[in-house]
Image: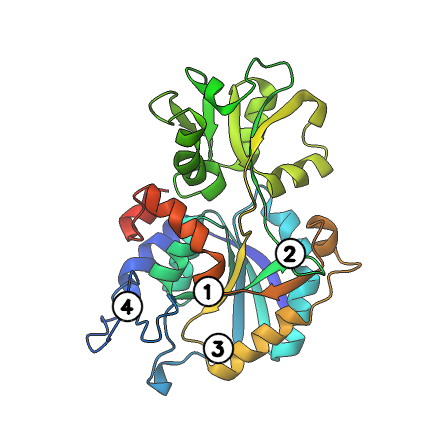
Amino acid sequence: MHKHPTILGAATLAAIAFSAHAATAQDDCPERGTLDPMYCDADGDLVADAPTDESALQDPGTLVFAYTPVEDPAIYADIWEPFIDHLSEVTGKEVQFFAVQSNSAEVEAMRSGRLHIAGFSTGPTPYAVNLAGAVPFAIMGSEDGQFGYKLQLYTQADSDIQEPADLAGKRIAHTSPTSNSGNLAPRALFPDLGVVPDEDYEVTYSGSHDQSMLGVVAGDYDAAPVASEVVDRMAERGLYDPEEVRIVWESDPFPTTSYTYAHDLAPELKEKIEEAFFSYDFSGTALGEEFTGVSKFIPITYKDQWAVIRQIQAANGVEYTPEGLAAE
């Protein structure tokens, strides 16, 4: 069973997030790394440990699931509906889908204890891990276990931009400060390609990969670094004509959206959630049609699969703090 999608207002969530659920720091924690003081990482896997006090574990009657903010939440609510039904069947819980308005709102919702299962975009995932106690366990992948997307640099088909170094002096759109492919990766990788963001060109934040791409098509921007998976889906929906743009450069693959659960869920519930994800068959579903090239959820760990992302964020001086999240 599931309820109709509801949009969580960012302002509402912000009001409750870092105050109402600001639990006491675990003073007896032997190690927490970069995790917020309310979490502990005694086993060194870089994610929050489950509470040692069983009374602190959550086993809610209704599970709340959210997917990373997208251009059209209503469409994605329909796309996720069959999976939510499957999740409900396997866990024996009612499942409610919430469409969040921003990455910040999504992180804050999990930290507040109001969000139990969530897909977080690549760049915001470390914020969710460190500030909200999110535990990444799955990612969409192909039958042979491959997954990932690329940072692609797009310009107009008739543009004189032929390589990243040609971005100097141009109007370039990045997406948002916390976005991996839309901002952090270009800042970490472009200097070795001959151009330094904010020095050789002024960064303009478009707000999303979609807006960056549409802005390039419209000529509002001379070029934009974007995530290949988003651009591919836009093309499939006919939101732009691929003949009007050209790829200047692309990176090696990065991980895509991480699927996580809250660290303080009861162990048996976590097992059921994982079972639901790993037993779901994408074939013949709206989810399989939307995310082309993938056929199932595959297991991952934050420590391993997000190592390259942490490296990029470290190169950008990113700190996983509420202030850093708010800057998004």
Mark 3 lies on residue: 60
The quarter of the rendered structure image containing the N terminus is bottom right
Looking at the image, is mark 3 or mark 1 earlier in the sequence?
3
CB atoms at circles 2 and 1 under 8 Å apart? no
List the residue tagged with mark 2.
146
Residues at marks 4 and 1, CA–CA distance in whole angstroms: 22 Å
Q: In which quarter of the image is residue 72?
A: top right
Return the x and y of residue 225 as percentages of the image width and height. 51, 32
> Which of pointers 4 and 2 lies earlier in the amino acid sequence?
4
The amino acid type, in three-letter code, at marker 2 is Gln
Res 32 label: 4
Question: Is the residue 155 above or below the residue 282 in the image?
Answer: above
Looking at the picture, which amino acid does disc 3 mark?
Pro
Three-letter residue code for mark 1: Leu
The residue closer to the viewer here, 220 or 96, is 220
Residue named by callout 1: 115
Q: In this view, does 86 lie above or below 158?
A: below
Q: How many residues crowd mark 2 within 10 Å: few (<14), some (14–19), many (20+)? A: few
Residue 104 in percent (x, y) is at: 40, 50
Does the image show residue 166?
Answer: yes
Q: Distance between the residues labelled 2 and 1?
A: 28 Å
